[in-house]
Image (cartoon, rainbow, N blue to C red):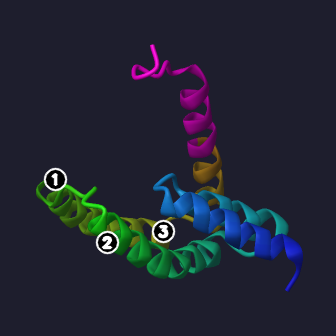
Amino acid sequence: MNITALLAGLFSGIIASMGMGGGAVLLIYLTVFASVEQLAAQGINLIFFIPIGLLSLIIYTFKKQIEWRICLPIAAVGVLGAFAGIYISGVISGDMLGKIFGIFLCFLGLKEIFTKDKKRS
């Protein structure tokens, strides 16, 4: 295991525990630097997320920063979305998924650059 892999894991964990999508860092590392196929990288990302998500859930629950009435319905619909994503990933090729993911990241990056933060203004 090399230092790049360890750093990717560290930064993915930090970003994921802050709720900012550490999977994006991990997916980029796996597909670009480790030459892992897109679908395999997504599976690895899901396995990586389980302990990070559980630890973060426990900590945020103790800090009383989770509004269960809001998040439980959203999580239930998210489970339905996961099943839809599993189906769609079986229909779309790995190359197309990679392109969709890249476009999605570019869109989010542009949104972050050009959206004014209402809290700071």
Q: Is residue 6 above or below residue 12?
A: below
Residue depicted at 66% across the width and 66% down the height: 26
Residue span colored magenta = 104-121
> What is the distance, in whole Å, between disc 3 and disc 2 at their CAs?
10 Å
Magenta highlight on residue 109: yes
* Front position among marks 1 and 2: 1
Q: Position of residue 76 (x, y in %)?
A: 19, 66
- The numbered mark at residue 83 is 2
* Front position among marks 3 and 2: 2
Give left or right: position of 93 versus 1: left
Q: Position of residue 14 (x, y in %)?
A: 60, 62
Residue most extreme to the top:
121
Q: In which quarter of the image is the C terminus?
A: top left
- The numbered mark at residue 52 is none
Q: Is residue 117 visible?
A: yes
In the image shown, does 112 or 85 lie closer to the viewer?
Answer: 112
- The numbered mark at residue 89 is 3
Give, as a three-letter code, the residue at label 2: Phe
Residue depicted at 65% across the width and 51% down the height: 99
Q: Where is residue 28 in the image (x, y as percent from the top left)?
A: 71, 60
The earlier-in-sequence mark between 1 and 2 is 1
Q: Quadrant of the N terminus?
A: bottom right
Name the residue beneath numbered marker 1: 70
Crowd rating for badge 3 (residues with CA inside 10 Å; few <14, some 14–19, many 20+): some
Element type at marker 3?
helix
Give, as a three-letter code, the residue at label 1: Ile
Q: Where is residue 21 in the image (x, y as percent from the top left)?
A: 52, 56
Q: In this view, does 15 lie above or below 45?
A: above
Q: In which quarter of the image is residue 79?
A: bottom left
Crowd rating for badge 2 (residues with CA inside 10 Å; few <14, some 14–19, many 20+): few
Give, as a three-letter code, the residue at label 3: Ser
* Front position among marks 1 and 3: 1
